[in-house]
Amino acid sequence: MVPLTVGDLARQPGLQIRVVAGGAGLENEVRWAHVAELSDPVPWLRGGELVLTVGLGVGSSAEEQREYVRRLVAAGCCGLGFALDTWISHIPPVVQETAEAHGFPLLYVEGETPFVALVEAVAEHYARERLHEQQRVLSAQDAMARAALRVGSAGVLRELATATDSDAVLLDAGGMVRETASGGEREWHATVRAAVAPSSPRPRGMTLLEDGEATVLLQSLGVSGTALGWLALRSLPPLSAHTRMLANHASSLLAVGLQGDRTARRERHHERERPLALLLDGNSATRLEPDATRLIPLPAPPVEVVFYPVSHPEETRDSAADTLQDVLGDTRAADRVAMCALPDGLVVVLPGSGNARPRFGERLLTALSATPSAPSSAGACDAHGARELRNAVQRARRAAAHERGYHHVADTEAWPLLLRALDPESAAEFRTVVLGRLREHDERNGTNLVTSLRCLLEHDGNIEGAARVLGVHRNTLRARLHTAERISGRSFSGQHRMELWLALLLDQSAEPESPIESS
């Protein structure tokens, strides 16, 4: 809002006003014009007033007149206006001298100009300014709405920053910068990230933060529950009501956008659920493994397969979709996560954490603890490709059944401990000795002897069960097994069976020949 100065008022056409003294203060802002005939009007003033008088309370002695002006100056008044020939015929010289000494504008309201004309002039100026401000707010709101439809959240931030002469940033639910009005990182962003970090109280509604000489308005996005994100607006004080109004309007638009993104993420994970369910189904997995990359874009191997036992897995899946970006710290990585709601819990296929601890599965368990249908435990197992997913889920389910908390099979099962103790070259040589001929035969003739043998051993030698999983007749499987015995030179009993099983386990734990690639 453009203020009205004493000089502006004195120059207004239609008002007969002459500056008598205190010209140095003509840039003083006029908040209001007020008629006062008391000898000490200060208790009834708030500062910024142009005091108008006929001289009734100015006093008769030089000291009274001097103190009268000094009190007005000390009260923060912007000036003093006199009308003559009603009570006094001239402005006392002491008043003029004191006003000049303090740079305090002293005005003579001449001719037929009534005091009420000055009051009306001040009121009309601010009424026009309020109307212009409202029009600017409406124009800015329209511009933000158009930007939301045309560009999205980045456009809303730019329009907000332009309309308020500020800088703006949008943070997601995890407190990470998602969009900025300025197009880059700024030092003040660190102040905002600290205020909304998961470890902080995370304010709801509108909060003001100090950033040097500037003020940061922080607004949570969303009506109820966990905040969808935050809008932060940095500007120089004072923070006007219209700036707050525009920030609130921008918050509504940004919240709608974030809610739309959340809904889209949930729908995307729901669509991917069916292909993952087929890969976990023993009757379909073998047939679908070659097309796994096309069916579902899994993270690059090795992946962390986590099982969360819950009674309402669909609700947990949606909650996990909402928080994945916060857990992984990467939007693209979150988009490659696959989830599947099973009757007894939720399966989540996450990127491998490498040597980082806690693993992503444990971080997700912590994030889900504050949601409805929160799991109390989780089991996890690494997998190197689509063919290992089903087995990894079974092992993760067993690990989750032990007790509360997160349990990875690499930390709890004996086999991973033994595997880490083996020399990799010796283990590879052992696999080649036991399985090498079978693999060569499969590659040369297009057969599935190794897969058939693995399925038989996983079913404890049950021909019927293994044949159903492979989708072949039991006699077909028997023929494959006879061929495998002949090619490998090993029977499927006693020590040879143990060697075959150990080689298959080592083969499963090693880097696969045809992993699911990241795309």
Image: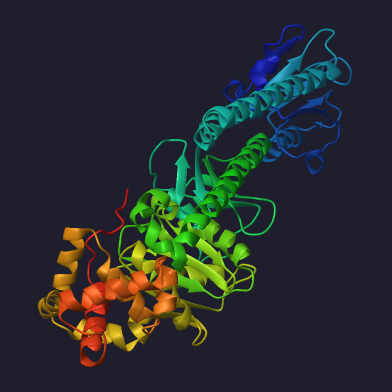
Q: Is residue 355 visible?
A: no
> Which quadrant of the rendered structure holds the N terminus?
top right
Location of residue 265 with respect to 203 vertically, above or below: above
Quadrant of the rendered image containing residue 357: bottom left
- Name, please, the residue furthest toward the bottom: 494
Residue 182 point in image, percent of width and height: 43, 35
Q: Give 130 or 286, whichever is nearer the viewer.
A: 286
Q: Quick one: 138 or 152, which is closer to the camera?
A: 152
- Residue at (66% x, 16% y) in the render: 8
**Residue depicted at x 61% and y 47%:** 259
Residue 185 position, x and y percent, is 38, 44
- Along the line of sight, which residue is nearer the eye, 502 or 82? 502
In percent of the image, x 35 and y 74: which residue is there?
A: 455
The residue at 72%/36% (across/down) is 72
Q: Is residue 264 positioned above or below 349 on the image?
A: above
Residue nearest the viewer, comparing 32 with 91? 32
Model colouring: rainbow
In the figure, 138 relative to 419: above or below?
Answer: above
Q: Is residue 177 left or right of residue 109?
A: left
Residue 233 visible: yes
- Measured as percent of width and height from the top left, residue 456 is found at 35, 78
Query: For residue 429, which quarter of the picture?
Result: bottom left
